[in-house]
Amino acid sequence: MLAQLAFLTNSLELHLQVEFRLVKSSSFFFARSFPMRRFSFLLGALALTLILSPAVAKAAGFEPGIGSWTGWYVGFHIGTNRNAYNGFGSADTLTQELTGGYNFQLNPKLVLGADLYSDWNTDTNHSVNALPGVSANYGSRGLGMEFMAGFPAGNFLPYVKAGYGQLSISGNLSGTANGARYGAGLIWRINTYSGLMLQYTYQKVNISNSLGNGDYRNSNITVGYNWFFD
Protein backbone atom coordinates (compact mmCIF):
# COMPACT_ATOMS: atom_id res chain seq x y z
CA MET A 1 0.00 0.00 0.00
CA LEU A 2 2.83 2.38 0.90
CA ALA A 3 4.61 1.57 -2.37
CA GLN A 4 1.41 2.31 -4.31
CA LEU A 5 0.94 5.58 -2.45
CA ALA A 6 4.49 6.68 -3.26
CA PHE A 7 4.10 5.71 -6.92
CA LEU A 8 0.82 7.61 -7.32
CA THR A 9 2.15 10.73 -5.59
CA ASN A 10 5.37 10.78 -7.62
CA SER A 11 3.48 10.24 -10.86
CA LEU A 12 1.11 13.08 -10.06
CA GLU A 13 3.97 15.43 -9.22
CA LEU A 14 5.74 14.57 -12.49
CA HIS A 15 2.70 15.24 -14.69
CA LEU A 16 1.81 18.47 -12.88
CA GLN A 17 5.42 19.68 -13.19
CA VAL A 18 5.29 19.06 -16.96
CA GLU A 19 1.99 20.94 -17.30
CA PHE A 20 3.23 23.73 -15.01
CA ARG A 21 6.29 24.26 -17.21
CA LEU A 22 4.16 24.33 -20.37
CA VAL A 23 1.92 27.02 -18.92
CA LYS A 24 4.88 28.94 -17.55
CA SER A 25 6.52 29.21 -20.95
CA SER A 26 3.40 30.62 -22.62
CA SER A 27 1.85 33.07 -20.20
CA PHE A 28 2.75 36.37 -18.58
CA PHE A 29 1.06 35.13 -15.43
CA PHE A 30 4.12 33.15 -14.49
CA ALA A 31 6.51 35.86 -15.54
CA ARG A 32 5.92 37.21 -12.04
CA SER A 33 6.41 35.39 -8.74
CA PHE A 34 3.90 32.59 -8.11
CA PRO A 35 2.83 31.67 -4.57
CA MET A 36 4.52 28.27 -4.49
CA ARG A 37 3.49 27.54 -0.91
CA ARG A 38 -0.17 27.72 -1.90
CA PHE A 39 0.46 25.64 -5.02
CA SER A 40 2.25 22.99 -2.92
CA PHE A 41 -0.82 22.78 -0.68
CA LEU A 42 -3.06 22.30 -3.72
CA LEU A 43 -0.70 19.66 -5.08
CA GLY A 44 -0.92 17.74 -1.82
CA ALA A 45 -4.72 17.97 -1.81
CA LEU A 46 -4.84 16.69 -5.39
CA ALA A 47 -2.53 13.78 -4.51
CA LEU A 48 -4.76 12.86 -1.55
CA THR A 49 -7.85 12.92 -3.77
CA LEU A 50 -6.09 10.69 -6.29
CA ILE A 51 -5.21 8.16 -3.60
CA LEU A 52 -8.68 8.06 -2.04
CA SER A 53 -10.89 8.22 -5.15
CA PRO A 54 -10.35 4.64 -6.41
CA ALA A 55 -11.05 3.24 -2.94
CA VAL A 56 -14.19 5.34 -2.58
CA ALA A 57 -15.38 4.33 -6.06
CA LYS A 58 -14.75 0.65 -5.34
CA ALA A 59 -16.60 0.86 -2.02
CA ALA A 60 -19.54 2.43 -3.84
CA GLY A 61 -19.61 -0.46 -6.32
CA PHE A 62 -18.10 1.35 -9.32
CA GLU A 63 -15.84 -0.73 -11.52
CA PRO A 64 -12.59 0.95 -12.61
CA GLY A 65 -12.14 1.63 -16.29
CA ILE A 66 -11.88 4.46 -18.76
CA GLY A 67 -13.94 4.04 -21.93
CA SER A 68 -14.91 6.90 -24.21
CA TRP A 69 -14.59 10.58 -23.23
CA THR A 70 -18.09 11.17 -24.59
CA GLY A 71 -20.65 12.30 -22.02
CA TRP A 72 -21.75 14.85 -19.44
CA TYR A 73 -19.65 15.97 -16.50
CA VAL A 74 -19.55 18.46 -13.63
CA GLY A 75 -16.51 19.76 -11.82
CA PHE A 76 -15.16 21.91 -9.02
CA HIS A 77 -11.80 23.73 -9.15
CA ILE A 78 -9.84 25.66 -6.57
CA GLY A 79 -6.58 27.54 -6.89
CA THR A 80 -4.85 30.87 -7.21
CA ASN A 81 -6.09 33.96 -9.03
CA ARG A 82 -3.99 36.92 -10.14
CA ASN A 83 -5.85 40.04 -11.23
CA ALA A 84 -4.87 43.61 -12.02
CA TYR A 85 -6.67 46.79 -13.04
CA ASN A 86 -5.19 49.94 -14.60
CA GLY A 87 -3.59 52.11 -11.93
CA PHE A 88 -3.45 49.30 -9.36
CA GLY A 89 -0.84 46.68 -8.63
CA SER A 90 -1.61 43.02 -9.25
CA ALA A 91 -2.43 40.72 -6.33
CA ASP A 92 -2.89 36.99 -5.72
CA THR A 93 -6.00 35.58 -4.09
CA LEU A 94 -8.10 32.43 -3.78
CA THR A 95 -10.28 31.42 -6.72
CA GLN A 96 -13.02 28.79 -6.98
CA GLU A 97 -14.91 27.58 -10.02
CA LEU A 98 -17.90 25.41 -10.84
CA THR A 99 -18.22 23.96 -14.31
CA GLY A 100 -20.47 21.58 -16.21
CA GLY A 101 -20.51 20.47 -19.81
CA TYR A 102 -20.53 17.79 -22.48
CA ASN A 103 -17.68 16.17 -24.40
CA PHE A 104 -17.88 14.23 -27.66
CA GLN A 105 -15.03 11.97 -28.76
CA LEU A 106 -14.84 12.18 -32.54
CA ASN A 107 -12.05 9.62 -32.90
CA PRO A 108 -9.23 8.12 -30.80
CA LYS A 109 -7.18 11.32 -31.11
CA LEU A 110 -9.74 14.12 -30.81
CA VAL A 111 -12.36 15.17 -28.23
CA LEU A 112 -14.55 18.26 -28.66
CA GLY A 113 -16.60 19.76 -25.87
CA ALA A 114 -18.46 22.75 -24.47
CA ASP A 115 -19.02 23.87 -20.90
CA LEU A 116 -20.58 26.56 -18.74
CA TYR A 117 -18.45 28.01 -15.96
CA SER A 118 -18.87 30.26 -12.94
CA ASP A 119 -15.86 31.44 -10.94
CA TRP A 120 -15.41 33.83 -8.06
CA ASN A 121 -12.22 35.36 -6.70
CA THR A 122 -11.91 36.52 -3.10
CA ASP A 123 -11.63 40.30 -2.60
CA THR A 124 -8.10 41.33 -1.67
CA ASN A 125 -6.05 44.51 -1.27
CA HIS A 126 -4.38 46.05 -4.32
CA SER A 127 -1.90 48.89 -4.01
CA VAL A 128 -2.51 52.18 -5.85
CA ASN A 129 0.50 52.69 -8.10
CA ALA A 130 0.50 56.49 -7.87
CA LEU A 131 -0.16 56.60 -4.10
CA PRO A 132 2.25 54.51 -2.01
CA GLY A 133 0.59 53.12 1.09
CA VAL A 134 -2.92 53.43 -0.34
CA SER A 135 -4.85 50.35 -1.47
CA ALA A 136 -8.27 49.24 -2.72
CA ASN A 137 -9.97 45.98 -1.84
CA TYR A 138 -11.60 44.20 -4.78
CA GLY A 139 -12.01 40.90 -6.58
CA SER A 140 -14.02 39.58 -9.50
CA ARG A 141 -16.74 37.19 -10.59
CA GLY A 142 -16.92 35.40 -13.92
CA LEU A 143 -19.67 33.61 -15.85
CA GLY A 144 -19.56 32.28 -19.38
CA MET A 145 -19.25 29.47 -21.91
CA GLU A 146 -16.21 27.76 -23.38
CA PHE A 147 -15.40 25.35 -26.21
CA MET A 148 -12.70 22.72 -25.82
CA ALA A 149 -10.49 20.62 -28.09
CA GLY A 150 -8.76 17.70 -26.35
CA PHE A 151 -6.19 15.19 -27.53
CA PRO A 152 -6.55 11.84 -25.70
CA ALA A 153 -3.47 9.91 -24.67
CA GLY A 154 -4.61 6.89 -22.69
CA ASN A 155 -6.04 8.07 -19.38
CA PHE A 156 -4.87 11.64 -19.99
CA LEU A 157 -6.56 14.43 -21.92
CA PRO A 158 -4.46 17.54 -22.61
CA TYR A 159 -6.67 20.29 -24.00
CA VAL A 160 -7.02 23.88 -25.07
CA LYS A 161 -10.16 25.97 -24.80
CA ALA A 162 -11.60 29.31 -25.86
CA GLY A 163 -14.82 30.98 -24.82
CA TYR A 164 -16.66 34.15 -23.98
CA GLY A 165 -17.96 35.42 -20.69
CA GLN A 166 -18.88 38.23 -18.36
CA LEU A 167 -16.37 39.53 -15.81
CA SER A 168 -17.52 41.74 -12.94
CA ILE A 169 -15.40 43.57 -10.36
CA SER A 170 -16.58 43.32 -6.76
CA GLY A 171 -15.55 45.13 -3.58
CA ASN A 172 -14.39 48.76 -3.51
CA LEU A 173 -14.48 49.00 -7.30
CA SER A 174 -17.31 48.16 -9.66
CA GLY A 175 -17.88 47.47 -13.32
CA THR A 176 -18.86 44.70 -15.70
CA ALA A 177 -17.68 43.80 -19.19
CA ASN A 178 -17.71 40.85 -21.59
CA GLY A 179 -14.72 39.35 -23.33
CA ALA A 180 -12.93 36.28 -24.62
CA ARG A 181 -11.42 33.77 -22.19
CA TYR A 182 -8.67 31.30 -23.12
CA GLY A 183 -7.25 28.31 -21.32
CA ALA A 184 -5.29 25.07 -21.37
CA GLY A 185 -5.14 22.09 -19.07
CA LEU A 186 -4.74 18.40 -18.43
CA ILE A 187 -7.30 15.86 -17.16
CA TRP A 188 -6.23 12.57 -15.60
CA ARG A 189 -9.11 10.08 -15.84
CA ILE A 190 -8.51 7.81 -12.85
CA ASN A 191 -11.63 5.66 -13.28
CA THR A 192 -14.95 5.62 -15.10
CA TYR A 193 -16.48 8.38 -13.04
CA SER A 194 -13.55 10.42 -11.71
CA GLY A 195 -11.01 12.77 -13.22
CA LEU A 196 -8.36 15.04 -11.68
CA MET A 197 -7.26 18.15 -13.52
CA LEU A 198 -4.90 21.08 -13.71
CA GLN A 199 -6.06 24.18 -15.62
CA TYR A 200 -4.93 27.68 -16.52
CA THR A 201 -7.28 30.40 -17.84
CA TYR A 202 -6.80 34.03 -18.85
CA GLN A 203 -9.30 36.81 -19.61
CA LYS A 204 -8.79 40.50 -20.36
CA VAL A 205 -11.68 42.98 -20.60
CA ASN A 206 -12.04 46.75 -20.73
CA ILE A 207 -14.20 47.94 -17.83
CA SER A 208 -15.79 51.38 -17.36
CA ASN A 209 -16.46 52.70 -13.86
CA SER A 210 -16.07 55.87 -11.78
CA LEU A 211 -12.32 55.82 -12.48
CA GLY A 212 -12.84 55.79 -16.25
CA ASN A 213 -11.97 53.01 -18.70
CA GLY A 214 -9.37 50.44 -17.80
CA ASP A 215 -8.13 46.98 -18.75
CA TYR A 216 -8.82 44.27 -16.19
CA ARG A 217 -6.63 41.17 -16.48
CA ASN A 218 -7.73 37.97 -14.77
CA SER A 219 -5.67 34.75 -14.58
CA ASN A 220 -6.48 31.51 -12.76
CA ILE A 221 -4.46 28.39 -12.14
CA THR A 222 -6.49 25.66 -10.49
CA VAL A 223 -6.60 21.99 -9.63
CA GLY A 224 -9.93 20.23 -9.62
CA TYR A 225 -12.12 17.16 -9.67
CA ASN A 226 -14.53 16.19 -12.47
CA TRP A 227 -17.38 13.71 -12.09
CA PHE A 228 -18.31 11.96 -15.34
CA PHE A 229 -21.80 10.61 -15.87
CA ASP A 230 -22.50 7.33 -17.66
Image: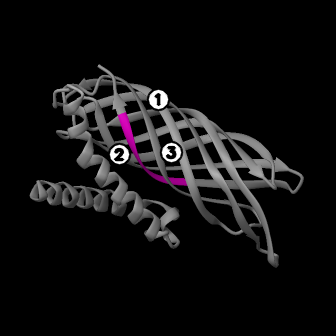
Please, what secondary structure does the residue beneath circle 1 have?
Answer: strand
Q: What residue sits 29% from the left and 54% below the top?
A: 47
User: Outermost residue, front direction?
Assistant: 59
Q: What residue sits 28% from the left and 29% below the top?
A: 193
Q: Which mark is residue 100?
A: 1
Going from N to C along the chain, the mark reached first, 2 or 1, is 1
Above or below, 129 relative to 15:
below
Residue 197 picture location, percent across and down? 35, 45
Q: Which mark is residue 197?
A: 2
Q: Amino acid at mark 1?
A: Gly
Residue 33 picture location, percent across and down? 51, 73
> Can I make out residue 189 in this image?
no
Residue 110 belongs to magenta span:
no
Above or below, 211 relative to 50:
below
Q: CA distance from mark 2 to mark 1?
A: 14 Å
Residue 181 picture location, percent across and down? 56, 43
Residue 222 belongs to magenta span:
yes
Classed neighbour count for the residue bearing mark 3: other residues with Cα under 10 Å, few (<14), some (14–19), many (≥20): some
Please, what secondary structure does the residue beneath circle 2 have?
Answer: strand
Q: CA distance from mark 3 to mark 2?
A: 16 Å
Residue annotated with mark 3: 182
> Mostly what secondary structure, the magenta segment?
strand
